[in-house]
Each structure stands twice: as structure tokens, then as C-alpha cells.
Amino acid sequence: MEDVQSGQPGVSLPIDRVGVKDIRLPIIVRHREKGRQHTVAKVDLSVDLPAHFKGTHMSRFVEALEGWAEELDYASFKKLLADIADRLEARSAHCRFVFPYFLRQVSPASKAGGLMDYKCQVEGELRDGKLIFTLGADVPVMTVCPCSKAISDEGAHSQRAVVRIRCRFDGFVWLEDIIEIAESAGSCRVYSLLKREDEKYVTEAAFANPCFVEDVVREAARGLAEHPQITWYRVEVESYESIHNHSAFACIESE
């Protein structure tokens, strides 16, 4: 059958990335306490395309996933990208896995247990045999505005914020490490299950530790910089303001 994709394009320009998005795939990721956790990832796969090819072979991305192991780690991730680059005769291959990661929490006062999910991701590009591998997590926290607390006779406005961390490292970094760094940066952690005594504890703890979005991003950046394995990071904090019709945000990226 005719290979239309390998024909000459009407416009001879190279394409940086072409591929497939939003493939659902069951995977296994490492868990610090239990060893492994089963979850489901949303997967994006792409390669570069030279100017002399009309199109890429989309089916080969899915074929590569079919032949790939379900356990996600650095070695298996690099193997998948190498296979994609080989199948599609590409110089570079890119992949992103986005998945919920679950940790069991204990409420601060009642000690009730509950599962908390975090949006996590691994992303990487293999170019000329070299892999750039990035680990990430989006972590909700609570913030109380220091200005509002200082100028108000009663109370202060509080809201939920999200700490988005992306990092690269030497050796190995647990997802739990970056989640803990993010949670410690806000006014207080966010919990999945709170009884009345827990609500009292969380409210009082947050109001005792008011912080701007700038404070949160600086604290998270400090924690990432002090981690012995992390070599590069980018952290963004977005605060979903409760008294404004907009969000506030701040971002720090290491050199």
C-alpha cells in the first residue's frame, strides 16, 4: 500500500513536535511506604518531523505503548522514548504522563484517615540519545492573607492555592518529597477529611501563619534548593483569591 506519510509535503518546513494526546493507560508508580501504586495516566507522545516528510505514522505511538511495561521509572521511560524514536525514525521523542497519585492522610486533631489525591506528572525528551527527565506535582494548600489580617477588625480572607512544582535531579526523588515541600510552604495543609475539631485546628493554624503567594513560592523554592538530589526546579503558586475575581500567582525558576 502507498505510504502517503513518507511523501513530499506541500510546504517543506520541519515540525518541532507531532504526535498523539490523551491516551489513557494503566501504570504502576513507586510508593515510598507501600512500594508500588497502581493508577491511570493520561499520556501524550510526540516526535520531531523533518521537512521532507508529509506526515508521521500515528499508529506507531500506540504500538510503542502496547509493547511497553506498565511500571513507570527512569529506565522504563527512557526505553519507551528510545523505542518511539526508533519506530518513527526521529531525532527526538517527547512523552508526558499525567496521573493521580494517592496518599493516606491523618487529620490533625481527630486522627481520622482519608485518601488525598495529587495531580502528578513525569515528562521527558530524548534527543540524540540524551534524556531530559522532569518530575512534577500540583499540590493544594491553604493561604491566609497577611494584609487582610493586619487591617481587619475581624478575620481575614483565606483561600486555596496550588503549588505547582517541576524538578530535575540526580539519583532518585520520591513524589512524597516534593509534595511535602509544597504542603509545608502554605499557611496550612489541605485535608480530604476533617471533623469539627480538625476544622478548628486547621483554621487556627492557618491564621497563625498568614502568607502571601510570594511567601509560599519562596518557601517552596527554599525547600527544593535544599533537597540534596534536586538540580533544577520551577515552582509556581496560584492563589484562587476568595475576595477577587482573579487569581494571584508567583513563580521562581532555578538557574
Image (cartoon, rainbow, N blue to C red):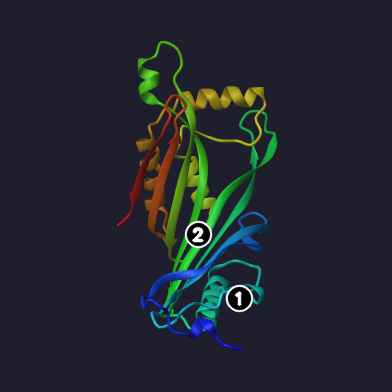
Give the residue at the far top of this rendering: 153
Q: Quadrant of residue 153?
A: top left
Quadrant for the C terminus in the image: bottom left
Residue 70 - label: none
**Amino acid type of the residue tagged 1 in the rendering:** Ser
Q: Residues within 10 Å of mark 1 (few under 14, many from 20)?
A: few
Foreground of the two, 223 or 128: 128
The residue singled out by tag 2 in the image is 173
Q: Which residue is mark 1?
A: 59
Query: Residue at 43% of width from left, 40% of height from top?
Result: 238
Q: Quadrant of the N terminus?
A: bottom right
Q: x and y percent of residue 173 in the render?
A: 50, 59
Instruction: Give the camera-side residue of 179 and 100.
Output: 100
- The residue sitting at the bottom extreme is 1
| First of labels 1, 2 by sequence position | 1
Identify which residue is drawn at 55% across, 53% down: 120
- Expressed as whole percent of the image width and height from the top left, the position of residue 225 reads 37, 52
Q: Mark 1: which secondary structure? A: helix
